[in-house]
Image: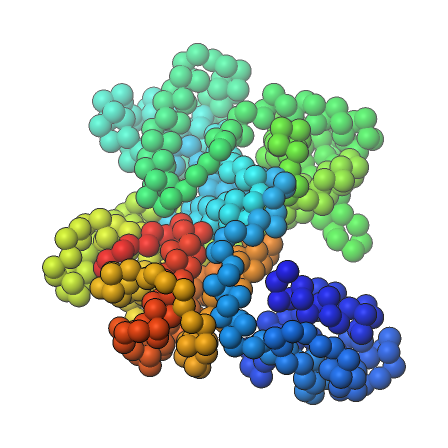
């Protein structure tokens, strides 16, 4: 039983209507607290009186219980807290064991570059994937490829007009991007190009051998480049089924809609009326008047496929906030169809990305490849490492971990709803609230342990109760709870921010308490240092970031 459960068990009869979620980790005055304001109406007493009366009735071993300004405060014995931290095996708790979580993330578009605009969906989704798996859930990572639509007809048209097999073989995705941008620029001048694009798109959908073969070549080139980036980011997927996979499954969705009396014809198009006065939305467009299915129709088919295939407990869509209406419509249609599991589907939205204030658009060609950003970060990281530690043997390997890690950690440090203006200089600051700072602290811990010949022996927990050591202990003790909260609230920043706090507290401890001091004190302090290192490495892995042993 963890501390929160211990407190809740002790107070649930004293505070009628209390819940485990009422027990909060305190920032000051105590370790845990319960605000008593919610009980005032039921008990017909002031929060201060309720807290005082409860404090007199509640007794918990190794804890002091006090009332303060309407709060019921709980302070854990420092020795007991240190003992409890060492007794708990990091990452051992599996509260989501037996559940299945599908996560739709990254979802790159075929024949388009993997640019920095894909960074947020990729790393948020990838981090949540690792967190849910660490918490015991069966995770299904889905890369819902953008591999269907008129734009691919346009690309074939562009390739036939201005491209060649030789150029495609030599330049790969760069050639496809150039053709894509040229097609969009020229189609604005010549409307006939749009008709030609629709013709080739229809041929792909009809299974035309030439059109499909060319498209599959474009797809292979795109995935080859994307998988190189995924490897650098420590990203995993279990499925690469894209939009095209669901095209022939749209008819089954239409049958469901017709059977439920939801499908209507409006100006030749198929629509479903969604929303009400409380949640107004335009109709969901299922099929255009020319017979082409729409994105939401294929997403409905995908939702049914995922539910039938994986029987998920949650299905997350890590997609930018500007797609909020689409997901509101998607979930609304499923609820109109009576699917109770629609409540288990979540749009994990995030803000937009810019680079030093410049928004990105593939269509216009002012695109910044993510691989180029990572390369720049690695080059800069190696320069810094050479200056800080010129004798480091594996500089290139460490620079890759630090440079890539800096970009990822920076993306995951702020709340996901916030728009991100990426700055390489800020991300690579070794002294700020950054990935390199956390990695360097981890390496410092490992270096101290190595110099001591290892961290062995049972620590005397009484020797880790001074303010600096105990601050570290507190931040380590509930790390698994932080991970659970991050997963449940879809906010990896909870973990990244806790890692920074641990580093800050450890460095204060490092400066205040000499670790290599001999005897029982050294044993205790080395044990705490090892726990810090293990927690930082574990936390970084959940954020897709490496933890070098030396830097």
Q: Residue at x 66, y 41 (%)?
A: 313
The residue lying furthest to the top in this view is 209
Work out whether 459 lies above or below 151. Answer: below
Residue 496: x percent and y percent? 44, 61
> What's the residue at 38%, 31% (across, down)?
223
Q: Quadrant of residue 76?
A: bottom right
Name the colour scheme.
rainbow
Instruction: Report if residue 223 is visible in the image.
Output: yes
Identify the residue at horizontal 79%, vertical 84% (top origin). 53
Q: Quadrant of the C terminus?
A: bottom left
Q: Specify whether 385 is left or right of 344.
A: left
Q: Residue at x 65, y 25 (%)?
A: 250
Residue 187 versus residue 119: which sits nearer the camera? 119
Image x and y of residue 460, in percent? 42, 71
Residue 41 quadrant:
bottom right
x and y, in percent, of residue 370 in the image: 33, 47
Q: Is residue 392 left or right of residue 503?
A: left
Vertical relation: 39 (above or below) 528 = below
Q: Which residue occupies the foreground of this view, 175 or 544?
A: 544
Quadrant of the image containing the N terminus: bottom right
Quadrant hosting residue 524 = bottom left
Decide which of 352, 119 is in the foreground and name it. Answer: 119
Whole-percent x and y of residue 538? 42, 54
Query: Which one is nearer the viewer's eye here, 480 or 255?
Result: 480
């Amino acid at each position: 039983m963890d501390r929160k459960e211990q407190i809740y068990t002790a107070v649930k009869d004293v505070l009628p209507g209390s819940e485990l979620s009422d027990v909060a980790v305190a920032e000051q005055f105590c370790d845990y607290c319960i605000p008593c304001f919610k009980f005032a109406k039921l008990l017909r007493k002031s929060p201060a009186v309720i807290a005082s009366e409860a404090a007199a009735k509640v007794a918990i071993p190794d804890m002091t219980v006090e009332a303060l300004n309407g709060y019921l405060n709980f302070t854990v014995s420092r020795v007991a807290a240190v003992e409890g931290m060492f007794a708990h095996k990091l990452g051992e708790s599996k509260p989501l064991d037996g559940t299945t979580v599908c996560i739709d993330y990254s979802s790159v578009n075929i024949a388009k570059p993997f640019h920095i605009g894909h960074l947020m969906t990729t790393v948020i989704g990838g981090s949540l994937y690792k967190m849910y798996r660490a918490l015991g859930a069966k995770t299904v990572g889905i890369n819902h490829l953008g591999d269907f639509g008129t734009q691919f007809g346009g690309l074939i048209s562009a390739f036939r007009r201005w491209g060649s097999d030789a150029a495609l073989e030599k330049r790969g995705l760069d050639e496809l991007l150039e053709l894509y941008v040229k097609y969009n620029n020229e189609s604005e001048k010549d409307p006939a190009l749009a008709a030609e694009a629709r013709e080739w798109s229809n041929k792909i959908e009809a299974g035309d051998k030439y059109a499909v073969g060319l498209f599959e070549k474009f797809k292979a080139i795109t995935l080859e480049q994307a998988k190189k980036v995924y490897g650098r980011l420590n990203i995993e997927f279990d499925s690469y089924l894209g939009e095209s996979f669901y095209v022939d499954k749209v008819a089954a969705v239409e049958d469901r809609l017709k059977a439920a009396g939801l499908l209507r014809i409006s100006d030749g198009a198929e629509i479903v009326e969604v929303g009400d006065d409380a949640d107004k939305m335009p109709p969901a467009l299922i099929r255009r008047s020319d017979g082409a299915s729409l994105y939401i129709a294929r997403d409905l088919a995908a939702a049914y496929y995922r539910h039938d295939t994986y029987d998920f407990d949650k299905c997350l869509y890590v997609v930018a906030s500007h797609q909020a209406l689409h997901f509101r419509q998607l979930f609304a249609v499923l609820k109109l169809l009576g699917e109770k599991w629609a409540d288990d589907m979540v749009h994990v939205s995030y803000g937009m990305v810019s680079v030093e204030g410049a928004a990105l658009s593939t269509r216009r060609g002012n695109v910044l490849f993510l691989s180029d950003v990572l390369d720049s970060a690695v080059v800069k990281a190696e320069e810094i490492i050479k200056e800080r530690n010129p004798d480091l043997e594996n500089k290139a390997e460490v620079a890759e971990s630090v440079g890539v890690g800096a970009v990822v950690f920076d993306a995951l440090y702020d709340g996901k709803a916030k728009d991100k203006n990426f700055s390489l200089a800020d991300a690579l600051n070794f002294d700020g609230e950054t990935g390199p700072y956390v990695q360097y602290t981890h390496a410092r811990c490992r270096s101290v342990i190595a110099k001591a010949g290892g961290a062995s022996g049972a620590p005397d927990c009484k020797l880790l109760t001074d303010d600096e050591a105990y601050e570290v202990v507190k931040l380590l003790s509930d790390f698994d709870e932080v991970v659970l909260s991050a997963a449940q609230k879809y906010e990896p920043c909870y973990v990244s921010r806790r890692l920074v706090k641990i580093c800050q507290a450890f460095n204060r401890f490092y400066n205040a308490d000499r670790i290599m001091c001999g005897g029982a004190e050294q044993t205790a302090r080395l044990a705490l240092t090892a726990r810090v290192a293990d927690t930082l490495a574990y936390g970084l892995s959940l954020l897709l970031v490496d933890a070098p042993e030396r830097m």
